[in-house]
Amino acid sequence: MTEQATFPGFSDGKAPDALRTIGEVAAALNIRQHVLRYWEEQFPMLKPIKRSGGRRYYRPEDVLLVATIDRLVHQQGYTLRGARQAIEGGEVKPAAESRTAPASPSVAANLISQLQAIRFALAEALAGA
């Protein structure tokens, strides 16, 4: 799976294995830059390349790690310490590996029709209220 497929926020035409600036990563994952800098202190395994002037460049594996940290902390309720321990202990998969395969067109069409039926039922219930 390519990085662009994993993180649709990267629509800059760069190759999937290109280095990303902290601004690009922050924008794509909707995480503020100061939070990324703080996470570098809290997660020793997160080490983007630093070039002249201290500019950070994130490799694809760094981006996956940031996405994993974000998922653990903001979606699954881990503390930073708990997330670090889970990652170090190998208890969690990186963000790209944890995603399920896309649904087949027939399954997706069935799901869409079910959701439309639910929406219609809710609209009728609200109209009757």
Image (cartoon, rainbow, N blue to C red):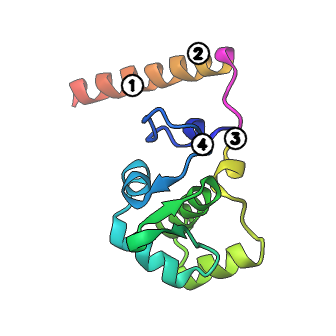
Judge from the rendering whether residue 65 lies leftward or rightward of residue 31; answer left or right.
right
3D distance between C-alphas at marks 4 and 3: 15 Å
Query: Which is in the foreground here, disc 1 or disc 3?
Result: 3
Distance (Cα) linking label 2 and label 1: 15 Å
Looking at the image, is mark 1 or mark 3 earlier in the sequence? 3
Which stretch did the figure color magenta?
101-106
Q: Amino acid at mark 2?
A: Ala
For mark 4, what is the residue?
3
At mark 2, the secondary structure is helix
Label 4 or label 3, whichever lies nearer to me, is 4
Q: CA distance from mark 1 to mark 4?
A: 34 Å
Residue 25, image x, y percentages: 44, 55
**Neighbours of disc 4 within 10 Å: few (<14), some (14-19), many (20+):** some
**Picture layout, residue 90 above or below residue 61:** below
Compared to 121, does 64 lie above or below?
A: below
Circle 1 sits in a helix, a strand or a loop, which is it? Answer: helix
User: In the rendered image, which residue does mark 3 sit on?
Assistant: 100
Amino acid found under the numbered disc labelled 4: Glu
Mark 2 vs mark 1, foreground winner is 2
Along the polypeptide, which appears first: circle 1 or circle 4? 4
